[in-house]
Structures are given as structure tokens and as C-alpha cells.
Image (spheres, helix red, strand yellow):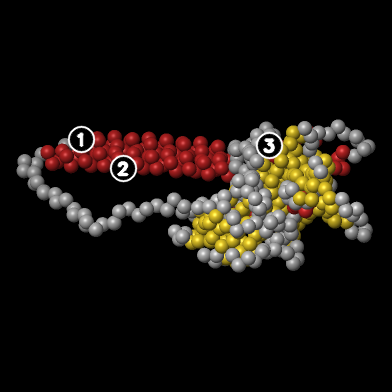
Amino acid sequence: MNRKDKKRKLTAVKSRITCLMLGVIMLLGVCCTGCSNTNSNTPGHLDAKNGVVVVSEYVALDGIEAGVAHGSGFFIGKDGEDPQYLITNHHVIADYLYFGAGQNTSFTDESGMTYALKSYVRVYFDAEDYEEAYVVGYNEVADVAVLRLAAPTSKRRALQLCSPTGDMVGSTVYAIGYPGIADNPVVDAVTSWGLDDLTFTSGIISRLTTTSGTGIQNIQVDVSIGHGNSGGPIVNTNGAVVGISAWGYMNENAEEAAYAVNIDEVISLLNLYSVPYVMESASGGNEKLIIAGIAAGAAVLLIVIVLIVYLLKNKRKKEISESAGSEAAAISVPVTPKAVPVSAPAAAAVDVTSHVDDSGYRLQGVSGALEGRRFMIRKNAPLILGRNGGVCNVAFPAATAGVSGRHCQVWFENGNVWIKDLGSSHGTFLTEGMKLSAEQAIQIKPGERFSLGSETEMFVLVQKGGN
């Protein structure tokens, strides 16, 4: 090939590369433009009502139900997916927990009469449409609780969360919920606990506070919060939740202050139980769209790089081939196969139980309904053992004798494994017969055993790969 032909071919390759790079720039421009476009026909704080519900407690005495109290709650989860988890205040479900947390129990009055007792938590989409909810976890001191429906629902959407920062003090926020004061006898409103019955009140973030002694983070707001608002979201103008309506304070001079639990208090609980949620991006835009745009741009750029390398390699191969073809005496080089040692090990087997949060410990079923089964103990999520499949990740058959709905919990912390009873009816026992008190945390070591209710349902703690 003469110099003129080579120059012409090189110019053609450069032209193709230039066209491809221009295409990448245009695509990246489209991606970036789309990421920053977060406008909506519906203001974010108004659209946030589509994630809010009534949370109500009920107690049944001898099968006769009576409503105890109600508050509000809001759903969380992944964008575009039907949500299953929701957040409320601990005090909204406190009576449910006090009266047995959904388990069959009994109550004896002052006259000595004994009644069958059972409590429930229900999530109302309107007055005629509700589903039962189950408690995943809670922090009584922080006054937060995470609930779970038996299955995802399409009747509400998940709200995004936003960690409050100091520069947000003075910014506008909205409380959304179902305060009882809104249904006062003067107005005599026809209400159905539906979306159209939600109450919005607005104000600003007055300051961010930390409670002395406990370190619990709260938000002081000048938003009107009434009974029934408890557990509902405090949202910013984009509709992202910054706090949870909690309580108010009035001094002897009738001066009032309202407080919300900082959303960071519940985020730690969500992480502990591996509950999905989405954070609002710092700019208030849709973080997922931004990430998707960057990923798409990176993918296109990678494709272009591959094409460039391919074109240059083909060009080089062709030049070498043409040059080699013009040689009269080609040199033949013998190729000796590379020897492979006979003792070379096979590829290492993959541990199918490996996990980024793997603590290295396992619960092994020794006897009973889960005999022979092994459960990984994660670093950041406890194992909840019991019959209630809605809240337990180590679930027993419904008819397992001696095992409560939420019986006990096993978790990894600071390099050790711990166990505690969750107020079970028949107790949790260590090998030596020691019965754990409710909420008593005890460290257990590999080889140590414990049982639920009786020795029939027994487990042993082992290390990964051990027996």
C-alpha cells in the first residue's frame, strides 16, 4: 500500500471516530437534560398524600372488637414498586404491643372474670377498606415503629425520605395525616378515612434538636399537629419525608411547641431490618434518574471505546497482513503447547451462602419443625424466630406447639452473637435450662444450644462451614 492510500484510509478511520464521539456527546447531553428535569404537574407535597394511611389499634375481648386509638402512617419502598412497609409512631401501636402483640392471651377483671384477649393493628385505605399490619421492629425511646402488610399494595405509593440538615431550618414543611380535631362536631364532616379526608397543615422547621440523655434527634416545627396526626409524615416541598409527627408541648403560659421525630431515627431501624427505602437526592431531584443517566452515558462511551479499539486493531491487522503477504520468505515459528501441571487444583467451589453482610455464623436446626435447616446470621439484620411469617424470617409452621408468633431474636453485634426472648408465651431456654427473661440479651457462642418453648424445637450456633 502506498503512502497516499494509507493516508486516505487513516482519514476515513478518523472521520468515523469523530462521528461516534459527537454521537456520545449528544446522548450525554440528552441524559443530563433529562436528569435535571424534575417538574411535575402536581406539587410534590400534595402528591405525597398518596402514601399516607390511617393506622388503628383494636382489641377483641371474647371476640367482641373495640377500637382503642388511631394515628397516621406512611409507606416506604422502592420507586415504581407497590409498597409493603410503612412507618408510624411507637405510641400509635403501644396498646397493641401491651395487649399481647396479636397473640391469643387472656384478661382478668377486678371481679375475677377472665376473657379471651387479642389485639390487632389495621391499616385503613378508607373506612371500608383495610388490611392487617404486623410489627417489624420499633424503638420505644425514639417513638418510631416499622410495620409490614402481608403483601404489597397498589392502593398507596412509597414516599422518599430526606435527612434534615441545618440549612433546612426556616424552610417550609407540611404535616399530612388524619387528626381527630378535623372531625369536630361543629363542622360535622362526613369522613371516610380516605385520601380526600387527609389534612394538610403548613409551617417551617424551627430548629433541629437532640434530647439530652438519650441522644434522640427531633425536629421542632411550627406546624399544627393534632391527635391522630401521630405517625404521619412531615414533608418538604418536594414531598420527601423529613420527620414523623409525634407530640406537642404546652407550658403554664399556654405557649406551645410541636415536634417531629427526625427521619434519621427510623432510617437506622430500616437498615437493621433490611427494609427497602429511597432517599431524595441532595438537589431535590430524582436520584434514580440521575444515576440512570450517568449509567447510560457511561455505557455509550464504553461502546464507542470498544468500536475505536476494534477499528484500529482491524486497520493494524490489515496493514500487517498486507506487509507479510509481500514478503517472499515468511518465517515459520513452531508453537510449543504450554504444559499444565497434573497437580493443578480445580477452580475453587463457590459458597452459595456467601453474602456481603455474612457474619460467619449460622443457626442450625437440631430438632423439631426446622431440624436440619441452616440460617445465615447477617451483620446488619437480626433473625426473628416465630410462627408469624409476616414478621419472622425464621418462620415455623402455624401449628408448632410452644412457639409464639414472635418468639425470640438472634443477632450479630460487635463480633459476637446474641439472643433475647421477645415476650414469648412459653419461653426461650438455653442448654443448661436457663429461661431468658423477656427482652433479656444473652451472648451465645458456637456449639451452644437453645430451644423455643421446649427441647423439641432446638437450635445450635455454628460457624460457617462447621457442624
- Mark 1: few, some, or many residues within 10 Å (few <14, many ≥20)? few
CA separation in Å, label 3 and label 2: 50 Å
Badge 3 element: loop
Gap in angstroms between the C-alphas marked 1 and 2: 21 Å
Q: Is residue 129 left or right of residue 20?
A: right
Q: What mark, if any, has residue 395 been given in the picture?
A: none
| Mark 3 closeness class: few <14, some 14–19, many ≥20 residues within 10 Å | many
Is there any visible trace of residue 342 in the rendered image? yes
Indicate the position of residue 452 as horizontal and vertical percent values: 63, 57
Tell me the amino acid under the disc marked 3.
Arg
Q: Quick one: quadrant of the N terminus? A: top left
Is residue 67 among what the camera can see? no
Q: CA distance from mark 1 to mark 3?
A: 67 Å
Q: Nearer the viewer, residue 337 or 406?
A: 406
Q: For numbered disc 2, what is the local secondary structure?
A: helix
Position of residue 303 measured from the top left corner of the image (x, y, whole percent) = 38, 40
Q: Is 39 placed left or right of 203 in the picture? A: left
Residue where numbered disc 3 is placed: 156
From the viewer's perspective, is the residue at label 1 or at label 2 nearer? 2
Circle 1 sits on which residue?
Answer: 5
Query: What's the mark number on residue 309?
Result: 2
Residue type, mark 1 in image = Asp
Verify CB contact (< 8 Å) between mark 1 and mark 3.
no
- Mark 1 vs mark 3, foreground winner is 3
Give the quarter of the image for residue 316.
Answer: top left
Query: Measured from the top left, where is residue 54 in percent x and y?
Result: 76, 41
> Sequence order check: which comes first, mark 1 or mark 2?
1
Residue name at image x 33 percent, y 35 percent: 16
